[in-house]
Each structure stands twice: as structure tokens, then as C-alpha cells.
Amino acid sequence: MSSSGAAAGFGLLSASTWGGSDFVGGLGARRAPALLVVVSGHAFTLVVLLAVCLSMRLAAPGWTPFLYSAVGGLEGALALALFYRALAMGAMGLTAALCGLLTALIPVLFSMIHDGLPTPLVAAGLVLGLCAIWLITRTPSTDEGLTGESAHSENSLAPASRTPLLMGALAGVGFGSQLILLKMAGTVSILWIMVYVRAAGVLGLVVLLLVVFRKGLPKGIRAGYIGLGILAGSLDTIGNVFYILASRFGRLDVAAMICSLYPGGTILLAMLILGEKPSRRQVAGIGLALAAVVLLSL
């Protein structure tokens, strides 16, 4: 298998597990605040990863991989919290689409500067991938504040509705930057990289939880969210490992683009398990995503 084919394969595995993580995390968020679900999963995987590294006596990498991984873990966790908050404020379709585009676009631009321009075939795959992300994540019917008598056109959003878009954009920049930082962590032990990522992420989320829930936990929390959080965190960790492998076998822009197609996996799981029907736009986006993966793997 060629290096580009391996990168595409690991990228698809990453997108699949990340999509599964979001699906399970969404189920958990129906039982408890999303931050509690995320923290439970991140804390569990941190303990498991640290135990594995210590039991196998893996050599810890130096300061440079530690800094890249820790910074990526911290800002990625904060970006996740910001993204959840943006979704809760409304304009969910636009917010998710903007976040998804920037998550892929930031590493693509960085890779073009760092690695040079891609071949025409890869460039076509990147363009198709960006279009696919927009179609898959863009769901106007879920946009609060854009329907009813007080609706505005998407080109004249009210100031209040611009706030979640700005937060979603910042979250996308955070996610995209995390992909770059994980790539720059080098070729050291992936498990130790994930330990640093999770440790910094848990620290940031715990501080955020203490601020958000300083007056106590909200009412209505249902049992089972910890188990769902652990499953979501485990899938997210596996997805990170596959992404790191994809970025090591191929260009950063190719790995980041394929991995960023994970919303398609979430939609497919929702269709198979919950019976939710994707829109025609989302089906078209998934078709474009498959075409993009084919081009990027050649």
C-alpha cells in the first residue's frame, strides 16, 4: 500500500471513530451537561493511557513533543467547550458548518505553506472535501433564530445570532490548530502524546467546570452519562491515534481533510441506530466525501 493510501485508510478510521464518539457523546448529553460527559471520558482515558505507558515502560519523549501535545490538548478541550456553548445558543447548522470548514481549512493552509502546494489531483480532493463538510454539517432546519416571524436571511443575521457563529469559528480554529500541533509533536510514542493531550485537556475542563457549575450541578441529570462519556472518550482517543498515524504517512492537509469528514459517520450512525433520516443535502455531502477520499488516496 502506498503512503497516500495508508494515510487515507487511517484517516477514514479516524473519521469513523470520531463520528462514533460524537454520536455516543450526543446521547450522553441528553442525560447530563455535555461538559460532564466530556470530562468523564477524558479522565478515564487519561488513567488508562498512563497505566499502559507505565506498565510497558515506554520512554517518555522530550520537552518539545510534550509542549506541542499539552498545548494542543488544552486548547482543543477549550475549543470543544466553546463549540458546545455555541450550539446551545442557536444557529446550529451554520455554526457546525463554519466550525467544520475551519477545522479542515486551517491545517490545509498550514500544510500548503509548510509542505508546498499539493498536486492538482490532491487539490481537487481538498476542494471536494471542503464542499462535503459544508453539505454534511449545514442543516438550516435546526437553526434557531432563522425561522418564524422574526427570521432573518442568512446574509443579514441579527447581532445576537452572530455570537454563536463567532464562537463556532473560534472553535474551528482551535480544532484545526490542535491537528497541526499533534502533527508537530513528531514521531515519538503516540501513547505518550495522548497522555499529554488528555492531561492538559482534563486540567482545562476541570477548571472550566468549577467556573460553570460554581453554584452546584444542575437538576435533571440522569444516570448512565458516565458510561456514555467513557465510551465517547475512548472512541475519541482511538480516533486521535488514527489521525496521528494518518498525518505520519501522508501530508497534513490530506490527513486533516479526511479526518474532518467525521460528521458523516455521526449521521450514518444516527440513521442506523436511531432511525433518523439524513437530508438530501447531507446524502450529497457524503457522496462528495467518498469522492474526495478516492482522489486524496491516489
Image: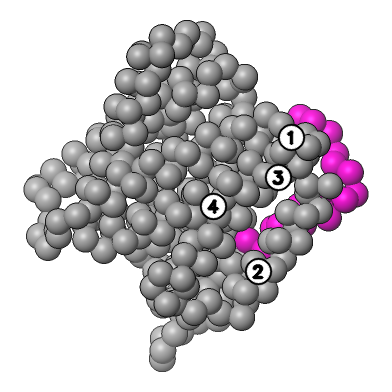
Q: Is residue 17 above or below residue 65?
A: below
**Alpha carbon distance from label 2 to label 1:** 24 Å
| Image coordinates for residue 113, horizontal then vertical, percent | 78, 34
In the image, farthest residue toward the bottom: 149
Q: Could you tell me if the residues under marks 2 and 3 are in contact, i.e. CB atoms within 8 Å?
A: no
Which range of residues does the magenta coloring cover? 114-133
Give 273 or 243, whichever is nearer the viewer: 273
Near mark 3 (Cα within 10 A), the count class, few <14, some 14-19 or many ≥20, is many
Task: Please name which of the two marks, 2 or 3, marks the residue nearer to the observer.
Answer: 3
Task: Point out which mark residue 69 bears.
Answer: none
Task: Point out which mark residue 250 bears.
Answer: 1
**Alpha carbon distance from label 3 to label 1:** 8 Å
The amino acid marked with disc number 1 is Gly
Image check: 287 left or right of 224?
Answer: right
| Image coordinates for residue 48, horizontal then vertical, percent | 32, 28
Task: Point out which mark residue 285 bears.
Answer: 2
Q: Residue at x 76, y 29 (%)?
A: 114
Image check: 243 left or right of 290?
Answer: left
Q: Quadrant of residue 173?
A: top right
The amino acid marked with disc number 3 is Ala
Location of mark 3 (residue): 8
Q: Could you tell me if the residues under marks 3 and 1 are in contact, i.e. CB atoms within 8 Å?
A: yes
Near mark 2 (Cα within 10 A), the count class, few <14, some 14-19 or many ≥20, is many
Q: Could you tell which of marks 2 and 3 lies nearer the N-terminus? A: 3
Q: Could you tell which of marks 2 and 1 lies nearer the N-terminus? A: 1
The amino acid marked with disc number 4 is Ser
Location of mark 4 (residue): 16
**Alpha carbon distance from label 4 to label 1:** 18 Å
